[in-house]
Image: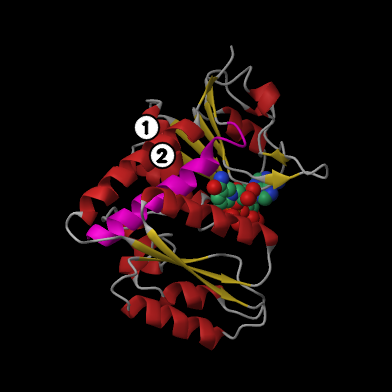
Amino acid sequence: MTAKILDGKSLAAEVRAGVKANVAGLASRGLRPGLAVLLAGDDPASKVYVRNKVRACEETGIRSERHEFPGDVSEKALLDKVAALNADPAVHGILVQLPLPAGVNSARILEAVSPRKDVDGFHAESMGALLSGAPGLVPCTPAGVMRLLEHAQVPLAGRRAVVVGRSNIVGKPLALLLLRKDATVTICHSKTRDLETIARQADILVAAIGRPKLVTAGMVKPGACVIDVGINRLADGSLAGDVDFAAVREVAGWITPVPGGVGPMTIAMLLENCLLAATK
Ligand code: NAP
């Protein structure tokens, strides 16, 4: 069997076109969604992510503003900036690019963002809404994975989903979203015993680990849907996911590539969240 490729790049382009049309519609009512991005320090990967997000905003007509701080920025300076952005009616979404420099309490900064402007869905109120099934802004990467599954009509209700990784930004929220769709969900992590056996039971297997090619063909049930969230930079400079793509695609029913799978969907969902925050 050769797996169907879940093409995040083309689905993300569709989503972005939809956002662009909606933004144009809002312009006729005098409303322009605005996103503020906070970036502190010199992390090269963060700079690339922020550049891509700002560019995506420009393409869809969402106004964006970038607020950059040096690596030795104080927590107070960041909190003051967040407070100013919370009060700014032209700013509908606030994104704090992680990681923040050591010495800054990231949780405190994220909690300072108004839940109404929390387009990353990292605020405790957003997470609480997700847990209880209430409406709210959902973290972008998990939302992007769900959109890919929905678009490919991968059956979820009653199916066994295994999420490897329990971070607050990917693994845990994604497990909750799968549960919302009536999957039977297991969350695995670095202390999980016999990961191979658990993974092989999955109809939907998600790798959100950050370890290149940790998921091998022997861990995949034939016909399963394999979602690779991982982005790992290899020694030769190339990108690899958490899944051994070449081998696993011969076993799985569906698979996401890296790059071109979950990554583009993350930015597309950020744009949708900006639109949602602006129209709420
Ligand atoms: P993270 O916070 O480092 O979490 C990694 C998770 O993997 C942890 O729960 C950890 O377990 C678990 N883990 C580590 N080694 C393991 C092992 N050998 N077996 C089983 N579980 C193991 O990472 P993250 O922020 O969730 O990101 C995960 C990956 O997704 C990274 O490669 C990241 O770059 C990528 N990512 C991609 C996107 C995108 O848009 N495509 C967005 C966000 C993140 P413990 O909890 O026990 O430590």
Q: Is residue 258 magenta?
A: yes
SS at mark 1? helix
Residue 184 visible to the viewer? no
Which one is in front, 241 or 190?
241
The chief SS type of the magenta part is helix
Colour style of the rendered protein structure: secondary structure
Kindly indicate whether the residue at mark 1 contacts the one at mark 2 (C-beta within 8 angstroms). yes
Does residue 234 appear left or right of residue 115 in this picture?
Answer: right
Q: Position of residue 12 (x, y in %)?
A: 44, 38
Alpha carbon distance from label 2 to label 1: 6 Å
Q: Which residue is mark 1?
A: 150
| Residue lying at 64% horizontally and 78% vertically, measured from the top left | 70
Q: Position of residue 239 (x, y in %)?
A: 70, 41
- Start and end of the magenta stretch? 257-280
The quarter of the image holding the C terminus is: bottom left
Q: Position of residue 214 (x, y in %)?
A: 71, 38
SS at mark 2? helix
| Residue lying at 78% horizontally and 44% vertically, measured from the top left | 237
Badge 2: few (under 14), some or many (20 or more) residues near its Cα, within 10 Å?
A: some
Q: Which residue is mark 2?
A: 146
Does residue 35 appear left or right of residue 219 in this picture?
Answer: left
The quarter of the image holding the N terminus is: top right
User: As drawn, which residue projects farthest toward the top?
Assistant: 1
